Amino acid sequence: MKTTGNIRIIADSTCDLTAELKDKYDITTIPLCIIMDDVSYFDGEEVTPDQIYQWSDENRTTPKTSAVNYEKSLSILKPMMEAGNDIIFFGISEKMSTTCNILRLIASDQEYPKLHVIDSMNLSTGIALQAIYASRLAREGKSAEEIVELVEGRRAKVRASFVVETLTYLARGGRCKPVTALLGNTLKLKPQIVVERGAMGVSKKYRGKQSSVILKYAKDLEEALLCADPYCVFITHSGCDESITDEVKAYLESLHRFENIYVTRAGGVISSHCGPGTLGVLFYAE
């Protein structure tokens, strides 16, 4: 039984939610596409991050990624439309993808004004935070219009950042120069990527082993974490040793701030751009 009633919460696959969390919060996902050897695969359904890493290393490049597929999206949304549901969709930042526009096109083509499209202005579990908030509001009995207004009013309070293990994948994808990646990897530089106003930028640069860098990064967030919304915080990674995620989780538990600490693995789209070993701590500022 769907506890969100007549309101359906949808997000694209870059929200990086686990199956358990999607079930807990009644969130449905629509996959973006990952293109390897001119073949398009649905993110999270037809290809895994580890398969992407293997392909990328063998071909010394990164896959291309593209927005959600129109027909696939419509097939997921159509039953909800036929049931007369209000649908609230969360998409990856419009500065990074045309996904939101595809959903708007579906709403227009189907003449379905009850499909509400929200540009998350974020990625990964920076999207998930907003979708979970919407789900909780729906369970409180808020209308779709109220939920959209409240979520968009709080959107700028999402704090999303990551520390990247290797610059190799960013260089392969054209997001930093190969010579910069070579020097950075040689010097063991680990940039902190921060999402602000829908775009990614470099904040700090750490140096050293990823295990020690990750914990230092998390502790550098302490002031903000102690003022965060206590409902939940995400640890999202693209393939880190469990010992590293456990250490970050233990640190967050030691703050005695959060009701829920969720650990999730990044999906194919996010992983194809950042490579293995990346980890982020994501939360709402209160």
Image (spheres, helix red, strand yellow):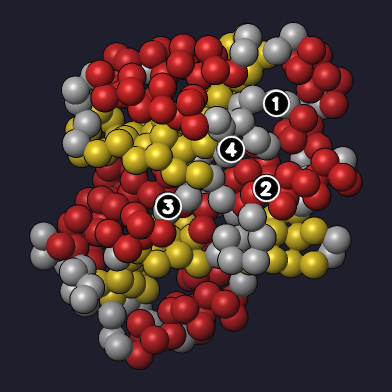
Q: Nearer the viewer, residue 141 or 164?
A: 164
| Discs 3/4, front | 4
The reply to whether residue 282 is in sight is: yes
Mark 4 is surrounded, within 10 Å at the Cα level, by few (under 14), some (14 to 19) or many (20 or more) other residues, namely some
The Cα–Cα distance between marks 3 and 4, rounded to whole angstroms, is 15 Å
Mark 2 is surrounded, within 10 Å at the Cα level, by few (under 14), some (14 to 19) or many (20 or more) other residues, namely some
Q: Nearer the viewer, residue 280 or 109?
A: 280
Mark 4 vs 2: CB contact within 8 A: yes
Residue drawn where x is 64% and y is 49% of the image: 49
Number of the label disc, if any, that sits on residue 17? 3
Residue 197 against residue 2 in the figure, above or below: above
- Residue beneath label 1, please? 166
Mark 3 vs 1: CB contact within 8 A: no
Q: Amino acid at mark 1?
A: Thr
Provide residue 4's location: percent of width, then percent of height. Answer: 20, 68
The Cα–Cα distance between marks 3 and 2, rounded to whole angstroms, is 17 Å
Provide residue 191's location: percent of width, then percent of height. Answer: 61, 20
Mark 1 vs 4: CB contact within 8 A: no
Mark 3 vs 2: CB contact within 8 A: no
Q: Earlier in the sequence, mark 3 or mark 1?
A: 3
Q: Report whether 185 appears left or right of 211.
A: right
- Residue beneath label 2, please? 50
Q: Residue furthest front?
A: 243
The Cα–Cα distance between marks 2 and 1, rounded to whole angstroms, is 16 Å
Q: Earlier in the sequence, mark 2 or mark 1?
A: 2
Residue drawn where x is 49% and y is 60% of the image: 12
- Residue beneath label 4, please? 239
Residue drawn where x is 34% and y is 45% of the image: 129
| Discs 2/1, front | 2
The Cα–Cα distance between marks 3 and 1, rounded to whole angstroms, is 24 Å
